[in-house]
Image (tube, rainbow, N blue to C red):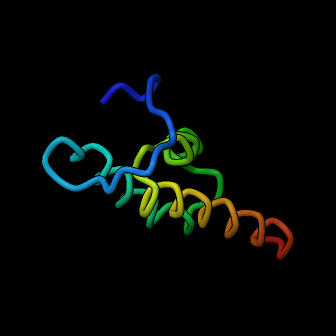
Amino acid sequence: MDYEHAAPADLPGLGPEYKAHQCLGMLLQILFSYEGVGEQLVATGLWSPVISSNRYAALHVLKVWDTLKYMGG
């Protein structure tokens, strides 16, 4: 997958052609536990054409990291 040319869209992300997007989604689901780790993955997730999983997961990571920052985590 060429991440430099990824752009937000409303694609469902199903099928073998979305395998890289599906892997990214799985990684994003665990990154919230590791504040500051994988920032490039989070940025890529925000620009993912797979809206229902990757972009929401990236936003969740940022929300949790921001909360941890204020809780001293």
Residue at the image point whose x is 55% and y is 38% from the top: 40
Left of 14 or right of it: where is 71?
Answer: right
| Residue at the image point whose x is 47% and y is 23% from the top | 4
The residue shown at (30%, 30%) is 1
Q: Residue furthest right?
A: 70
Depth check: give the residue in front, 59 or 50: 50
Q: Say left or right for 63 vs 51.
A: right
Q: Is residue 13 above or below residue 64?
A: above
Q: Residue furthest left?
A: 16
Residue at far front of view: 10
Q: Quadrant of residue 26?
A: bottom left
Image x and y of residue 55, in percent: 52, 55
Q: Of all residues shown, which one is farthest toward the bottom?
A: 71
User: Residue 61, image x and y in percent?
Assistant: 60, 62
Work out whether residue 71 or residue 21 is closer to the camera in this orientation and state it. Answer: 21
Residue 3 found in image quarter? top left
Q: Position of residue 29 (x, y in %)?
A: 44, 66
Quadrant in which the C terminus is drawn: bottom right
Please tell me which residue is depicted at 60% across the width and 67% down the height of the picture: 60
The total of numbered circles placed on residues is 0
Q: Nearer the viewer, residue 22 or 50?
A: 50
Residue 65 in the image, given as x and y percentages of width and height: 70, 64
Is residue 52 rendered to the left or right of residue 72? left
